[in-house]
Amino acid sequence: MNAVWIAAALLTAGFAGWPVTALVFRLARTIDDKADAAASAGRDAADDPSADVTVDSPASVDSPAAGDRVNTVNGDITVDAGGAAAPEPGGEASAKRILRGGAIIGVLERLAVCLAILAGQPVAIAYVVAIKGLGRFAELKETPVAAERFIIGTLASMLWAAGVAALTKVVLLG
C-alpha cells in the first residue's frame, strides 16, 4: 500500500505542481502590473496601497539597454536577438528564446524533491538546486527578468513538492 501512496505523491507533486506554479507567476505579474500602473500614473508605488510592493526610486533603477527588451512568446521569455534589429516582415523584431524547457525541468525538479524527501534524503534537494542553477547560469546572468522568473518558479515548485512529500510522509505513510 505504501508504494501506491508514494506513486500518488510523486504524480501529485510532479504534475499538479504546474498549475500551482502558474498561479504564483500570475500573482507575481499582477503585483508587478499594479506597481507599473502606479508609476505611470505619476504616483509613488511605495505609497500606493493598491501596488502592494515597494519599488526603488527611479534614480536608483537601472534603465535597460536597447538589447534587453523583454517579451514573451508562447509563455517563454524572449530578448531581442540583435539589439536594434529591424523588424521582420511579420512586424516583430527577431527574438531569442531563453529559459526553454522550463515546464519539463519543473516536473523533473518536483519529482526529485518529492522523492528525496520520501526517501529520507533531503540533502539531495541541494543537488537539484545546484544542477538547475548551474545549467541556467548564463541565461540568468544576461537577463534579470529571467532570473526573477527562475527564482519565483523554483521556490513555488519546490515548496509544492516538499509540501506534498511531507504530507504524504506524515499523514499517509505515518
Image (spheres, rainbow, N blue to C red):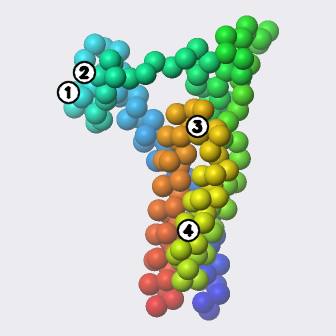
Q: Does 113 appear above or below 85?
A: below
Quadrant position of residue 143: top right
Q: CA distance from mark 2 to mark 1?
A: 6 Å
Q: Are marks 1 and 4 in contact (CB under 8 Å)?
A: no
- Residue 75 in view of the camera: no
Q: Residue at x 65, y 29 (%)?
A: 78
Q: Quadrant of the N terminus?
A: bottom right
The image shows residue 94, relative to residue 35, as above or below, that is: above
Earlier-in-chain disc, 4 versus 2: 2
Residue that mark 3 sits on: 141
Q: Report how far apart the C-alphas of labels 3 and 2 lie in the structure.
A: 29 Å
151 to the left or right of 7: left
Around disc 4, counting alpha carbons within 10 Å, would you say few (fewer than 14), some (14 to 19), or many (20 or more)?
Answer: many
Residue 137 at x, y percent in the picture: 62, 45
Q: Residues within 10 Å of mark 3 (few under 14, many from 20)?
A: few
Q: Which residue is mark 2?
A: 44
Of circles 4 and 2, which is in front?
Answer: 4
Residue type (three-letter) at the residue carrying disc 2: Asp
Label 4 to label 2, Cα distance in Å?
40 Å
Check disc 4 and report the residue beneath it.
Answer: 125
Of callouts 1 and 4, the N-terminal one: 1
Q: Are marks 2 and 1 in contact (CB under 8 Å)?
A: yes
